[in-house]
């Protein structure tokens, strides 16, 4: 059911969805994704059906084959799409799942246009950026809006205005604004208003130049969101409005915040959502209901205790590689009225001789996901330290596989036990490649991806945490626990607490004699949101707090 009673008509299109296009200027990393997610949260709180789409200018078909140092984490959706990490922010803020349609890349656009050309779909036409590439971009935006029956689609254009690879997207936005009409579309430009400490003043010139560059591409911003370190005085706002051809009320200040979850509340104070609904002719049905959000932010800002948990991984120098894990800890911490302080531990630096010192006095150990053999010995040392000292342990994907390897070696006497990923000649391949993965040659988009069901055994830690017997979680892996060796592992005390009901694949393992020792093959961090913190993270943080109190 649409929020709007009567769809409008514009330039031969019947428009039942409003489109908001968000671009960025001056510099990268200003936080377009957070602004999009925050605006989406505000509009959702007003009763609108909202989704957010990311247009990525890179030529990779998706980020699935990129190094985490290049791109940060790969966010996986229910339908198995490997996407930009901003989709994680969208889901965490809106509490709604995204899909393949929510992430569009230049690589995917050109790939699909070339496939159509090979099939003769263009009737012999010369294929050009305009109109064929821009038409394909517009089609992806409109399809998402129409098939999802959304009231509002927020479209984040990746990169910075002026980037050569972003020009087709800006042109597609310009055309689409004409297609659907000015009252059905909106252009928001995120820019920087730097503060020069030596001069003691803010400078508007970078914003002016950024808007000028956007205008040269034929796109006029309706609203400017200005990132700033200090409050923007009325005179500065008037100056920006005058030289950028917007109203003063459309100059929105986005000041630095201690937490990304404060941004929706800051945008509410600035009136961003009100300006949006006024410009898009959206009926105003009262102020957004953000009471639950405010309660969450208060819990984050005013924790009653602090607990330190080690995150052991090989990409720890680049925290974006574990973005969803970090955010899941924030959600779980709020539930437990605690602040989770993460100790970032480089697995390559860990050894049996220094692990006690490096992990000393932490109240929990999480061994992170990843691929390849680099840093595996350090992860195994971390697992053993947590298991032997009964420190709450959480292993995710490769972290779960490391837990199985360590258990096989040190509890089951399987000397040389390993994953076939690291040692194809191991006498005990407790972790082996999935049968359907053995003959795959292409690396991109070919893993076990997306949502799969899992059945939980009663009386297990996992069953207690979830409070349910049947769940579904998102996956991204090629290797799994080898069911041929499962009986030997279980005889030694490892408990399989979760399996896929269709194929019997092992999803969760536990060591019942430990206070909290859980490894999962899936990625629970990808389903944790503000309103629905993931139960395994909540239970893990609770166990860490109890361990800290006992110690």
Image (tube, helix red, strand yellow):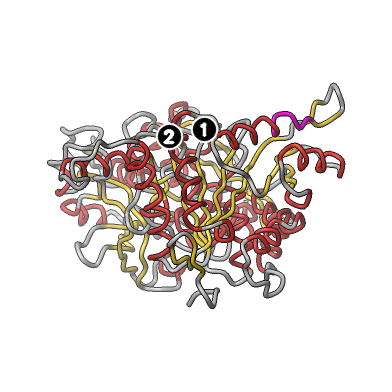
Quadrant in which residue 424 is drawn:
top left
Range of magenta residues: 203-207
Q: Note whether 275 is above or below 400 in the view shown.
A: below
Q: Are marks 2 and 1 in contact (CB under 8 Å)?
A: yes
Quadrant in which residue 472 is drawn:
bottom left
> Which element type, helix, strand or loop, lies under badge 1?
loop
Residue 190 in picture, x, y percent from top left: 64, 42
Residue 356 in picture, x, y percent from top left: 52, 34
Query: In the displayed image of the protein, which residue is found farthest to the front?
Result: 11
Does the magenta portion include 116? no
The answer to whether residue 157 is left or right of residue 454 is: right
Which residue carries the number 2 mark?
68
Q: Is residue 295 visible?
A: yes
> Which element type, helix, strand or loop, lies under badge 2?
helix
Disc 2 versus disc 1: distance between alpha carbons? 8 Å
Residue at left 27%, top 37%?
127
Number of marks in picture: 2
Foreground residue, 423 or 137? Answer: 137
Residue at left 20%, top 41%?
117
| Magenta stretch, overall SS | helix
Which residue carries the number 1 mark?
318
Query: In the displayed image of the protein, which residue is found farthest to the top?
Result: 198
The answer to whether residue 304 is left or right of residue 200 is: left
Residue at left 38%, top 42%?
105
């Amino acid at each position: 059911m649409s929020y709007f009673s009567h769809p409008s008509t514009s330039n031969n299109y019947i428009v039942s969805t409003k489109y908001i296009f968000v671009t960025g200027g001056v510099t990268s990393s200003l936080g377009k994704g957070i602004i999009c997610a925050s605006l989406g949260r505000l509009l959702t709180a007003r009763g609108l059906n909202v989704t957010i789409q990311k247009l990525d200018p890179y030529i990779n078909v998706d980020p699935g084959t990129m190094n985490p140092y290049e791109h940060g984490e790969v966010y996986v959706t229910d339908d198995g799409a490997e996407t930009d990490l901003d989709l994680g922010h969208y889901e965490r803020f809106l509490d709604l799942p995204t899909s393949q349609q929510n992430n569009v890349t230049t690589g995917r656009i050109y790939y699909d246009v070339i496939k159509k050309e090979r099939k003769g779909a263009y009737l012999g036409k010369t294929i050009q950026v305009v109109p064929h590439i821009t038409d394909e971009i517009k089609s992806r935006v409109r399809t998402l809006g129409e098939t999802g029956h959304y009231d509002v689609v927020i479209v984040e254009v990746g990169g910075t205005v002026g980037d050569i690879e972003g020009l087709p997207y800006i042109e597609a936005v310009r055309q689409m604004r004409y297609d659907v009409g000015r009252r059905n579309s909106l252009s928001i430009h995120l820019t920087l208003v730097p503060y020069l400490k030596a001069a003691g003043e803010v400078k508007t010139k970078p914003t002016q130049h950024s808007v000028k560059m956007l205008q040269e591409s034929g796109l006029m911003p309706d609203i400017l969101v200005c990132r700033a370190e200090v409050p923007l005085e009325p005179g500065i706002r008037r100056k920006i409005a005058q030289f950028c051809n917007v109203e003063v009320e459309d100059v929105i200040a986005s000041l630095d915040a201690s937490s990304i979850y404060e941004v929706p509340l800051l945008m509410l104070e600035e009136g961003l959502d009100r300006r949006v609904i006024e410009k898009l002719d959206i009926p105003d049905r009262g102020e957004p209901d953000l009471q639950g959000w405010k309660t969450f932010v208060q819990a984050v800002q005013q924790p009653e205790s602090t607990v330190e948990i080690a995150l052991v991984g090989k990409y720890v120098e680049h925290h974006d590689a574990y973005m969803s894990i970090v955010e899941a800890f924030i959600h779980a911490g709020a539930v437990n009225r605690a602040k989770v302080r993460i100790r970032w531990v480089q697995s390559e630096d860990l050894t049996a001789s220094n692990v006690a010192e490096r992990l000393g006095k932490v109240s929990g150990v999480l061994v992170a996901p990843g691929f390849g053999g680099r840093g595996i010995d350090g992860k195994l040392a971390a697992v053993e330290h947590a298991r032997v000292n009964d420190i709450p342990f959480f292993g995710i994907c490769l972290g779960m596989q490391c837990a199985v390897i360590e258990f096989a070696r040190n509890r089951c006497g399987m000397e040389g036990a390993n994953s076939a990923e690291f040692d194809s000649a191991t006498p005990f391949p407790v972790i082996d490649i999935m049968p359907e993965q053995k003959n795959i040659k292409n690396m991109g988009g070919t893993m076990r991806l997306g949502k799969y069901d899992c059945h939980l055994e009663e009386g297990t830690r996992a069953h207690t945490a979830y409070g349910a017997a049947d769940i579904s979680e998102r996956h991204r892996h090629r290797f799994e626990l080898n069911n041929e060796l499962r009986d030997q592992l279980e005889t030694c005390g490892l408990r399989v607490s979760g399996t896929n009901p269709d194929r019997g694949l092992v999803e969760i393992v536990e060591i019942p004699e430990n206070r909290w020792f859980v490894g999962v093959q899936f990625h629970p961090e990808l389903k944790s949101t503000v309103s629905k913190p993931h139960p395994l993270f909540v239970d893990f943080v609770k166990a860490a707090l109890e361990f800290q109190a006992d110690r």
